[in-house]
Protein backbone atom coordinates (compact mmCIF):
# COMPACT_ATOMS: atom_id res chain seq x y z
CA UNK A 1 0.00 0.00 0.00
CA UNK A 2 1.36 3.38 -0.98
CA UNK A 3 0.56 6.18 1.46
CA UNK A 4 -1.22 9.08 -0.16
CA UNK A 5 0.98 11.91 1.08
CA UNK A 6 -1.14 14.48 -0.75
CA UNK A 7 -4.05 13.47 1.46
CA UNK A 8 -1.88 13.64 4.59
CA UNK A 9 -0.61 17.07 3.58
CA UNK A 10 -4.15 18.34 2.98
CA UNK A 11 -5.32 17.00 6.34
CA UNK A 12 -2.47 18.79 8.09
CA UNK A 13 -3.19 22.00 6.19
CA UNK A 14 -6.93 21.74 6.97
CA UNK A 15 -6.07 21.62 10.67
CA UNK A 16 -3.65 24.57 10.44
CA UNK A 17 -0.59 22.42 11.15
CA UNK A 18 2.61 24.00 9.87
CA UNK A 19 5.15 21.55 11.34
CA UNK A 20 4.73 18.05 12.73
CA UNK A 21 7.21 15.56 14.18
CA UNK A 22 6.21 12.04 15.17
CA UNK A 23 7.96 8.95 16.48
CA UNK A 24 10.43 8.01 19.16
CA UNK A 25 12.25 11.01 20.63
CA UNK A 26 15.89 11.22 21.67
CA UNK A 27 17.86 14.20 22.92
CA UNK A 28 19.64 14.44 19.57
CA UNK A 29 16.37 14.43 17.63
CA UNK A 30 14.87 17.05 19.94
CA UNK A 31 17.87 19.30 19.27
CA UNK A 32 17.61 18.76 15.51
CA UNK A 33 13.84 19.30 15.49
CA UNK A 34 14.32 22.39 17.65
CA UNK A 35 16.82 23.84 15.19
CA UNK A 36 14.44 23.09 12.30
CA UNK A 37 11.52 24.73 14.14
CA UNK A 38 13.55 27.82 14.95
CA UNK A 39 14.79 28.12 11.37
CA UNK A 40 11.28 27.68 9.99
CA UNK A 41 9.81 30.31 12.31
CA UNK A 42 12.58 32.80 11.52
CA UNK A 43 11.83 32.55 7.79
CA UNK A 44 8.29 33.72 8.47
CA UNK A 45 9.55 36.98 9.97
CA UNK A 46 7.74 36.61 13.27
CA UNK A 47 8.52 38.81 16.28
CA UNK A 48 11.55 37.45 18.15
CA UNK A 49 9.66 36.97 21.44
CA UNK A 50 6.97 34.96 19.62
CA UNK A 51 9.63 32.73 18.03
CA UNK A 52 11.21 32.24 21.46
CA UNK A 53 7.91 31.28 23.11
CA UNK A 54 6.89 28.84 20.37
CA UNK A 55 10.38 27.32 20.34
CA UNK A 56 10.60 26.98 24.14
CA UNK A 57 7.13 25.42 24.44
CA UNK A 58 8.00 23.00 21.63
CA UNK A 59 11.21 22.00 23.42
CA UNK A 60 9.49 21.67 26.80
CA UNK A 61 6.75 19.47 25.38
CA UNK A 62 9.21 17.19 23.57
CA UNK A 63 11.39 16.97 26.71
CA UNK A 64 8.35 16.04 28.82
CA UNK A 65 7.50 13.21 26.42
CA UNK A 66 11.12 12.00 26.27
CA UNK A 67 11.38 12.07 30.07
CA UNK A 68 8.14 10.12 30.45
CA UNK A 69 9.42 7.51 28.00
CA UNK A 70 12.65 7.23 30.01
CA UNK A 71 10.68 6.59 33.20
CA UNK A 72 8.63 3.93 31.41
CA UNK A 73 11.60 1.92 30.06
CA UNK A 74 10.80 -1.05 32.32
CA UNK A 75 7.08 -1.01 31.45
CA UNK A 76 5.65 -3.77 29.28
CA UNK A 77 4.09 -0.91 27.27
CA UNK A 78 7.40 0.87 26.66
CA UNK A 79 7.58 0.29 22.89
CA UNK A 80 4.03 1.53 22.36
CA UNK A 81 4.63 4.59 24.56
CA UNK A 82 8.01 5.45 23.02
CA UNK A 83 6.78 5.20 19.41
CA UNK A 84 3.63 7.25 20.03
CA UNK A 85 5.15 10.73 20.39
CA UNK A 86 3.87 13.58 18.22
CA UNK A 87 4.38 17.32 18.44
CA UNK A 88 2.79 19.84 16.08
CA UNK A 89 2.97 23.57 15.58
CA UNK A 90 0.12 25.23 13.82
CA UNK A 91 -1.72 28.43 13.15
CA UNK A 92 -5.35 29.16 13.91
CA UNK A 93 -7.48 32.29 13.76
CA UNK A 94 -6.61 33.11 17.36
CA UNK A 95 -2.83 32.62 17.09
CA UNK A 96 -0.33 29.80 17.01
CA UNK A 97 -0.65 26.51 18.85
CA UNK A 98 1.74 23.83 19.94
CA UNK A 99 0.20 20.41 20.56
CA UNK A 100 1.95 17.36 21.86
CA UNK A 101 0.67 13.88 22.39
CA UNK A 102 1.78 10.46 23.47
CA UNK A 103 0.49 7.22 24.88
CA UNK A 104 0.32 7.23 28.68
CA UNK A 105 -0.24 4.42 31.14
CA UNK A 106 -3.68 5.02 32.68
CA UNK A 107 -2.12 4.64 36.13
CA UNK A 108 -0.22 7.90 35.47
CA UNK A 109 -3.14 10.01 34.22
CA UNK A 110 -4.44 11.21 37.59
CA UNK A 111 -0.98 12.48 38.61
CA UNK A 112 -0.53 14.22 35.25
CA UNK A 113 -3.92 15.92 35.20
CA UNK A 114 -3.51 16.93 38.85
CA UNK A 115 -0.44 18.93 37.79
CA UNK A 116 -2.21 20.61 34.87
CA UNK A 117 -5.72 21.29 36.21
CA UNK A 118 -4.66 23.98 38.72
CA UNK A 119 -2.62 25.76 36.03
CA UNK A 120 -5.68 26.04 33.80
CA UNK A 121 -7.55 28.09 36.39
CA UNK A 122 -4.68 30.43 37.31
CA UNK A 123 -4.20 33.93 35.97
CA UNK A 124 -0.81 35.20 34.75
CA UNK A 125 0.12 36.76 38.11
CA UNK A 126 -0.63 33.51 39.96
CA UNK A 127 1.37 31.48 37.46
CA UNK A 128 4.31 33.86 37.84
CA UNK A 129 4.18 33.54 41.63
CA UNK A 130 3.91 29.75 41.47
CA UNK A 131 6.93 29.67 39.14
CA UNK A 132 8.97 31.79 41.57
CA UNK A 133 7.90 29.64 44.52
CA UNK A 134 8.92 26.43 42.72
CA UNK A 135 12.27 28.00 41.79
CA UNK A 136 12.95 28.80 45.43
CA UNK A 137 12.00 25.27 46.51
CA UNK A 138 14.50 23.68 44.14
CA UNK A 139 14.45 20.07 43.04
CA UNK A 140 12.51 17.80 45.41
CA UNK A 141 14.25 14.71 46.79
CA UNK A 142 13.86 11.74 44.46
CA UNK A 143 13.03 13.94 41.47
CA UNK A 144 15.13 14.99 38.51
CA UNK A 145 13.36 18.32 37.99
CA UNK A 146 11.74 21.14 39.92
CA UNK A 147 8.46 20.73 37.99
CA UNK A 148 8.74 24.08 36.25
CA UNK A 149 8.07 22.96 32.67
CA UNK A 150 4.28 22.86 32.66
CA UNK A 151 4.14 26.06 34.69
CA UNK A 152 6.40 27.78 32.19
CA UNK A 153 4.26 26.57 29.28
CA UNK A 154 1.15 27.92 31.02
CA UNK A 155 2.90 31.25 31.67
CA UNK A 156 3.88 31.68 28.01
CA UNK A 157 0.55 30.57 26.59
CA UNK A 158 -1.97 33.28 25.82
CA UNK A 159 -4.95 31.06 26.65
CA UNK A 160 -5.31 28.43 29.39
CA UNK A 161 -3.75 25.08 28.56
CA UNK A 162 -6.05 22.46 27.09
CA UNK A 163 -5.74 18.71 27.19
CA UNK A 164 -7.64 15.67 26.03
CA UNK A 165 -7.47 12.00 26.88
CA UNK A 166 -8.40 9.29 24.39
CA UNK A 167 -8.82 5.85 25.89
CA UNK A 168 -7.01 3.20 23.84
CA UNK A 169 -7.60 0.08 25.94
CA UNK A 170 -7.84 -0.96 29.59
CA UNK A 171 -4.19 0.01 30.22
CA UNK A 172 -3.33 2.89 27.93
CA UNK A 173 -4.66 6.29 26.85
CA UNK A 174 -3.43 8.91 24.42
CA UNK A 175 -2.80 12.25 26.14
CA UNK A 176 -2.78 15.50 24.13
CA UNK A 177 -1.68 18.89 25.49
CA UNK A 178 -2.32 22.15 23.65
CA UNK A 179 -0.84 25.58 24.29
CA UNK A 180 -2.06 28.62 22.31
CA UNK A 181 0.12 31.71 21.83
Image (spheres, rainbow, N blue to C red):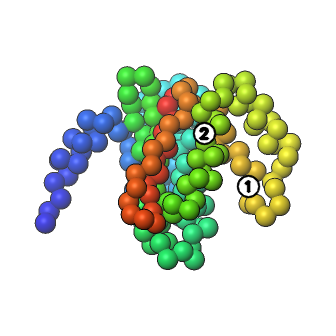
Residue at disc 1, secondary structure: loop
Q: Is residue 61 above or below residue 48?
A: below
Question: Residue at point 13% right, 66% down?
Answer: 1
In the rendered view, would you say 133 is above or below 73?
above
Residue 14: x %, y % from top left: 26, 35
Mark nearest the camera among 2 and 1 is: 2
- Whole-angstrom CA distance, mark 2 to mark 1, is 19 Å
- Does 157 sit left or right of 91 as displayed? right
In this figure, what is the number of numbered marks? 2
Mark before the other along the chain sequence, 2 or 1: 2
Answer few, some or many: residues within 10 Å of disc 2's Cα (few below 14, many 20 plus, some between 14 and 19).
some
Helix, strand, or loop for circle 2?
Answer: helix
Q: Which mark is residue 58?
A: none
Residue 33 in view in this figure: yes
Looking at the image, do the residues carrying marks 2 and 1 touch, with CB atoms under 8 Å apart? no
Q: Is residue 153 left or right of residue 134?
A: left
Q: Residue 145 bears which disc, if any?
A: 1
Question: Residue at coordinates 66% horizontally, 24% vertically from top-left?
Answer: 123
Is 42 or 158 nearer to us in this picture? 158
Q: Quadrant of residue 103?
A: bottom left
Q: Position of residue 33 (x, y in %)?
A: 48, 52
Q: Is residue 24 visible?
A: no
The foreground one among 134 and 26 is 134
**Above or below, comparing residue 51 to residue 27 in the picture:** above
Question: Which residue is situated farthest in the left direction here?
Answer: 1
Measured from the top left, where is residue 54 in percent x and y?
A: 53, 36
Residue ranking furthest to the right? 136
Report the disc number at residue 117: 2
Which residue lies at the image location 20% right of the left edge and 52% below the top edge? 5
Query: Which residue appears at 16% of the width and 54% of the height?
Result: 4
Return the x and y of residue 159 as percentages of the image width and height: 54, 27
Instruction: Answer left or right for 5 relative to 87.
Output: left
Amino acid sequence: MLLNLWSVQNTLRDHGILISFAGKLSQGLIEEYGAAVKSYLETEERPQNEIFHIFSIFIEQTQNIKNYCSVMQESRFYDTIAQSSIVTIGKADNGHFICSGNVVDKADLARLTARIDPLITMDKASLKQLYKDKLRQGVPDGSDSAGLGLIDIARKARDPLEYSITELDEHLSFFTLKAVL
